């Protein structure tokens, strides 16, 4: 885990230059009056608790000489110090996923990513209970980490703990733009797995519906959509309009621009009206 420290002219040498020989230092040049700075600051502080770097925060109004020395013309301006050398990083606000990409490019490691790799390794050799216990501990430590929530939801989806996966995914709302699309995909997969794991139904339509759900899980989307469409044309009211809802869920999985989505949306509209 990294640390966060306020830096000025007096302690810059010790906290940034000297410290950068031990681990990377991200220097956040900011101003109190700068809106994007106030948005970026908490995200950087959050990441400093997860990644192995020092966050050095420099108020340019309190330390104008430092801002001048390092060519700061606009804020926020984040620079990087490694082995005593300060280089440019980025200027302006970046969303959290982009910040994570930036840290990955700098080869700065994440404690969370390392823990997840250990969890996947345990699960791969059959130590599922141990992996799940470690995952629960991570969720307690990072309860608001949207990336972790998605990883955990996928873990529980693969383990067929669908109720747990659903409850985790419910924490991600549509306004979480960087994560909402992935969450929507996982919600659809949970739904299809619920269909697939249901006891065999008594009717031909029940069996056809369950078969279509399994086709989705096998990623045979064309066959699944054709099956759902066939069910819909035979009985629109089956499972409370379930075939139409299932087709919409497949569209969510594929995305609006997928050829199958475009084709079967048209066919769905024709079947409905």
Image: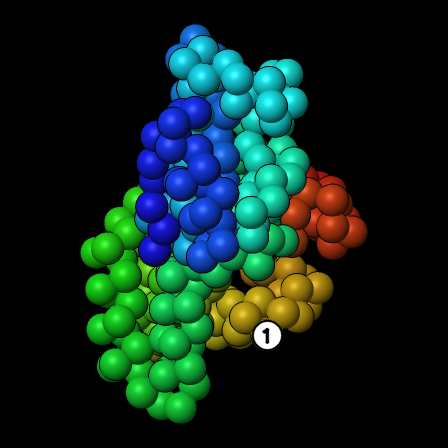
The outermost residue toward the top is 33
**Count of numbered labels shown in the rendering:** 1
Give the quarter of the image for residue 55.
top left
Q: Is residue 46 above or below residue 222?
A: above
Q: Is residue 66 visible?
A: yes
Q: Is residue 186 above or below residue 223?
A: above
Q: Is residue 129 above or below residue 261?
A: below
**Residue visible at 65% across and 47% down in the picture:** 255
**Residue visible at 64% across and 60% down in the picture:** 225
**Residue visible at 43% across and 48% down in the picture:** 19
**Residue visible at 33% across and 46% down in the picture:** 3
Residue 154 position in % (x across, y down):
42, 64
Q: Is residue 124 above or below residue 163?
A: below
Residue 84 position in % (x across, y down):
56, 47
Crowd tier of the residue under label 1, counting other residues whose Cα lies within 10 Å: few below 14, some 14–19, many 20 or above? few
Specify whether 268 is left or right of 174: right
Looking at the figure, which quarter contains the C terminus? top right
Specify whether 30 is left or right of 133: right
Is 132 or 105 nearer to us in this picture? 105
Which residue lies under the disc numbered 1? 218
Is 250 or 28 nearer to us in this picture? 28
Residue 212 position in % (x across, y down):
56, 69
Describe the element under mark 1 as helix, strand or loop.
loop
Q: Is residue 186 visible?
A: no
Is 182 or 79 nearer to us in this picture? 79
Residue 142 position in % (x across, y down):
28, 52
Looking at the figure, which quarter contains the N terminus? bottom left
């Amino acid at each position: 885990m990294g640390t966060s420290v306020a830096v000025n002219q007096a302690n810059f040498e010790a906290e940034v230059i000297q410290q950068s020989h031990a681990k990377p230092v991200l220097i956040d040049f900011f101003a109190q009056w700068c809106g994007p700075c106030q948005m970026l600051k908490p995200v950087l502080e959050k990441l400093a608790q997860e990644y192995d770097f020092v966050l050095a925060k420099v108020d340019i109004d309190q330390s104008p000489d430092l801002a001048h020395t390092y060519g700061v013309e606009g804020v926020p301006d984040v620079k990087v110090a490694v082995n005593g050398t300060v280089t440019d990083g980025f200027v302006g606000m970046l969303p959290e996923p982009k910040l994570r990409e930036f840290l990955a490019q700098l080869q700065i490691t994440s404690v969370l990513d390392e823990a997840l790799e250990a969890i996947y390794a345990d699960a791969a050799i059959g130590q599922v209970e141990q992996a799940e216990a470690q995952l629960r501990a991570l969720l307690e430590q990072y309860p608001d980490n949207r990336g972790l929530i998605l990883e955990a939801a996928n873990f529980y989806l693969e383990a067929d703990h669908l109720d747990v996966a659903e409850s985790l995914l419910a924490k991600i709302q549509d306004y979480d733009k960087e994560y909402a699309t992935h969450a929507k995909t996982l919600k659809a997969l949970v739904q299809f797995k619920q269909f697939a794991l249901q006891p065999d139904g008594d009717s031909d339509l029940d069996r056809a519906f369950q078969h279509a759900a399994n086709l989705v899980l096998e990623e045979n989307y064309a066959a699944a959509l054709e099956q759902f469409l066939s069910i819909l044309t035979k009985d629109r009211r089956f499972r409370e309009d379930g075939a139409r809802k299932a087709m919409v869920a497949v569209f969510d999985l594929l995305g609006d621009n997928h050829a199958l989505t475009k084709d079967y949306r048209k066919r769905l509209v024709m079947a409905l009206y």
